[in-house]
């Protein structure tokens, strides 16, 4: 079969298959390829466009509206957290920054103790790492933006190391977030989705699944529509898999009146991110070079307090101007000096402490997802600690000044300025907060009375409905999530195939 571009479709479509999968991201694609390898007839529905290397112009104003949810304007209900989430064939993997981590053992142990999960993921990590070319990106190739994290941590005696990436033949351009025009990024678009097509499967792009028809614990039909009120798409299948990613997967279940144990949409996690830019006396050019190649987990284990890990974002001009520095003259001055700016990120490990319990997805009146994510006291404390840590890294790496993202920015020029951060306001709408890692909302746990899915990914109370994406994670991860989702989806092939 092939890719059917929904937006070119003029007539309603009625199809049937063995397995229909909603969503072509990290989870849906790995699963689709595995099921097709077992001889099953698979159709993948994807609400985003089928965009390939020829469409990846590296122009931010074109890429963001085309490849991200809500045209790059997704946010929490109170607008406190900007939500960066992919929306095209390949999902988040088409625009992600390629960092790959196995699920840390401490997280797997926590899941074992708290949720009775023993997932034995190692063989699945090995399989996906091989397929996706996951390998360490040599430290010598780190760009100056990432180098500040490495140098600063080393000067402080803190842990920091080169990260692993899913790339082959990467030319170190730095534009991963706009889609890779070199087909070097081993995202789903050119790997597992190609495997699916080679094995006879189909992808229907530009088609949003609106509801799942079901009765008596059996799902039977996915009702979709080509975006913006176009033709209807109806897919009958023996098995239905929801893989729309955290936020959208719980929303689709809720829209279909599926809510086992009243848990759908609950326990949504974001790795809430705070950033700290700093000016350096030398050129950084943070838009060039692999975007995220150094990381530090120095502060991931803070005992009773919420842990965080540090990484580095790319600094393309539109992303930098929108995300980093205010309005008017302040923004203009910041952008004039962007060439010498390096920025650090701290990502909060939510879901491990009662003081960072996550958020909730519900439905808006028009059926689209709404994400409420209160900024808890535990996060406020961690944001502050993260700012102090990032400022120390910048100073140790030779920055002349670090400047916070408060409406009235605080400037740190020496260790003696750090005290000001300790009394600065932190929390919702008090400074910029982002997320590029959405997790949870369809919790996997062993306990049938509190789960949405079990370890076989089957939705509680259903015999043929599954969730296979980042929404099943019972906590956040404290590392970038894609490889965990790839491995879970690889593991899910067997139970879904049956
Ligand atoms: C800018 C950015 C950078 C990132 N960098 C990294 C990184 O370096 N390393 C890392 O590990 N992770 C990174 N991530 C996160 C990672 O890409 C995601 O965690 C991962 O892709 C999530 O996989 P998923 O299967 O849960 O969902 P997704 O990959 O988001 O896929 C879900 C797909 O389903 C589609 N969909 C949703 N609802 C419907 C519906 N109703 N009908 C039809 N289709 C639907 C969506 O359009 C989307 O394409 C990044 C993400 C972003 C946005
Ligand atoms: S940095 Fe590498 S993977 Fe990213 S867009 Fe450039 S060539 Fe592609």
Image (cartoon, rainbow, N blue to C red):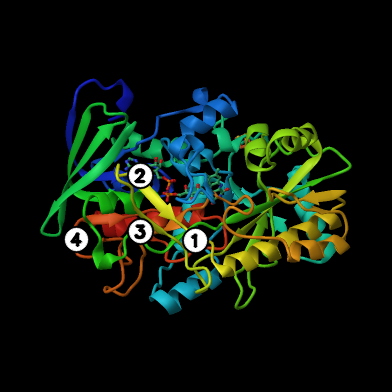
**Badges 2 and 1: C-beta atoms under 8 Å apart?**
no
Q: Work out whether residue 265 or residue 162 is closer to the camera in this orientation and state it.
A: 265
Q: Give the label on residue 265, or none.
A: 3
Query: Which of the two discs, 3 and 1, sits closer to the camera?
Result: 1
Q: SS of the residue at dot 2? A: helix
Nearer the observer: mark 2 or 4; the answer is: 4
Determine if residue 266 is in view: yes
Q: Nearer the viewer, mark 2 or mark 1?
A: 1
| Residue located at (44% from left, 55% from top) | 485
Callouts 3 and 1 close, C-beta under 8 Å: no
Q: CA distance from mark 2 to mark 3?
A: 27 Å
Work out whether mark 3 precedes mark 1 in sequence or the reverse, and give the earlier one: 3
Residue drawn 75% across the image and 38% down it = 330
Name the residue tied to disc 1: 374
Q: Quadrant of the N terminus?
A: top left
Q: Is the C terminus in the top left, top right, bottom left or bottom right quadrant?
A: bottom left
Picture coordinates of residue 187, whole percent (x, y): 49, 41
Q: Which mark is residue 453?
A: none
Q: CA distance from mark 3 to mark 1?
A: 14 Å
Q: Is residue 184 visible?
A: no
**Disc 2/disc 4 C-alpha distance (Å):** 23 Å
Binning the other alpha carbons within 10 Å of mark 4 as few (below 14), some (14 to 19) or many (20 upward) gives some
For residue 462, the mark is: 4
Q: Height in image: 192 above or below 372?
A: above
Q: Which residue is mark 2?
A: 33
Tell me if 473 is positioned left or right of 35 in this view: right
The first of marks 2 and 1 along the sequence is 2
Residue 215 shown left or right of residue 383 in the figure = left
Nearer to us of marks 2 and 3 is: 3
Residue ID at (57%, 59%): 479
Sequence order check: which comes first, mark 2 or mark 3? 2
Disc 4 vs disc 1: which is toward the camera? 1
């Amino acid at each position: 079969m092939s890719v059917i571009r929904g937006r070119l479709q003029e007539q309603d479509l009625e199809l049937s298959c063995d397995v229909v999968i909603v969503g072509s991201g990290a989870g849906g694609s790995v699963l689709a390829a595995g099921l097709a390898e077992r001889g099953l007839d698979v159709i993948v529905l994807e609400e985003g466009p089928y965009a390939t290397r020829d469409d990846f112009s590296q122009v931010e104003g074109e890429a963001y509206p085309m490849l991200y949810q809500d045209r790059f304007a997704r946010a929490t209900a109170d607008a406190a957290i900007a939500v960066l989430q992919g929306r095209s064939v390949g999902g988040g993997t088409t625009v992600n920054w390629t960092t790959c981590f196995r699920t840390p053992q401490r997280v797997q142990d926590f899941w074992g103790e708290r949720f009775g999960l023993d997932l034995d993921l190692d063989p699945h990590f090995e399989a996906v790492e091989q397929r996706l070319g996951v390998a360490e990106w040599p430290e010598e190739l780190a760009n100056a933006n990432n180098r500040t994290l490495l140098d600063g941590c080393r000067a402080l005696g803190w842990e920091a190391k080169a990260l692993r990436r899913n790339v082959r033949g990467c030319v170190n351009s730095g534009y991963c977030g706009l889609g890779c025009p070199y087909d070097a990024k081993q995202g789903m678009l050119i790997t597992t989705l190609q495997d699916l097509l080679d094995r006879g499967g189909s992808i229907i792009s530009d088609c949003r699944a609106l509801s799942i028809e079901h009765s008596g614990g059996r799902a039977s039909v996915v009702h979709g529509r080509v975006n913006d009120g176009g033709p209807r798409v109806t897919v009958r299948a023996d098995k239905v898999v929801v893989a729309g990613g955290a936020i959208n997967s719980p929303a689709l279940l809720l829209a279909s009146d599926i809510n086992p144990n009243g848990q759908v949409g609950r326990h949504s996690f974001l790795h809430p991110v705070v950033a700290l830019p700093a000016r350096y006396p030398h050129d950084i050019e943070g838009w060039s070079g692999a975007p995220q190649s150094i990381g530090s987990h120095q502060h991931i284990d803070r005992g009773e307090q919420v842990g965080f890990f540090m990484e580095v974002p790319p600094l393309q001009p539109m992303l930098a101007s929108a995300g980093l520095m205010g309005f008017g003259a302040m923004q203009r001055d910041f952008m004039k000096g962007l060439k010498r700016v390096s920025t650090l990120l701290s990502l909060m490990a939510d879901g491990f402490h009662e003081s960072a319990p996550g958020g909730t997805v519900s439905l808006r009146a028009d059926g689209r997802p709404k994400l409420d994510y209160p900024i808890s006291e535990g996060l406020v404390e961690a944001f502050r600690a993260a700012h102090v840590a990032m400022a120390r890294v910048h100073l140790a790496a030779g920055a002349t000044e670090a400047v916070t993202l408060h409406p009235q920015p605080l400037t740190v020029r020496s260790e003696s300025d750090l005290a000001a951060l300790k009394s600065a306001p932190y929390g919702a709408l008090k400074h910029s907060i982002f997320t590029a890692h959405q997790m949870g909302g369809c919790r996997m746990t062993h306990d049938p009375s509190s789960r949405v899915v079990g370890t076989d990914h089957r939705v509680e109370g259903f015999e043929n409905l599954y969730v296979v994406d980042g929404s099943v994670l019972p906590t956040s991860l404290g590392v970038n999530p894609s490889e965990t989702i790839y491995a879970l989806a690889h593991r899910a092939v067997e139970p879904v195939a049956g």
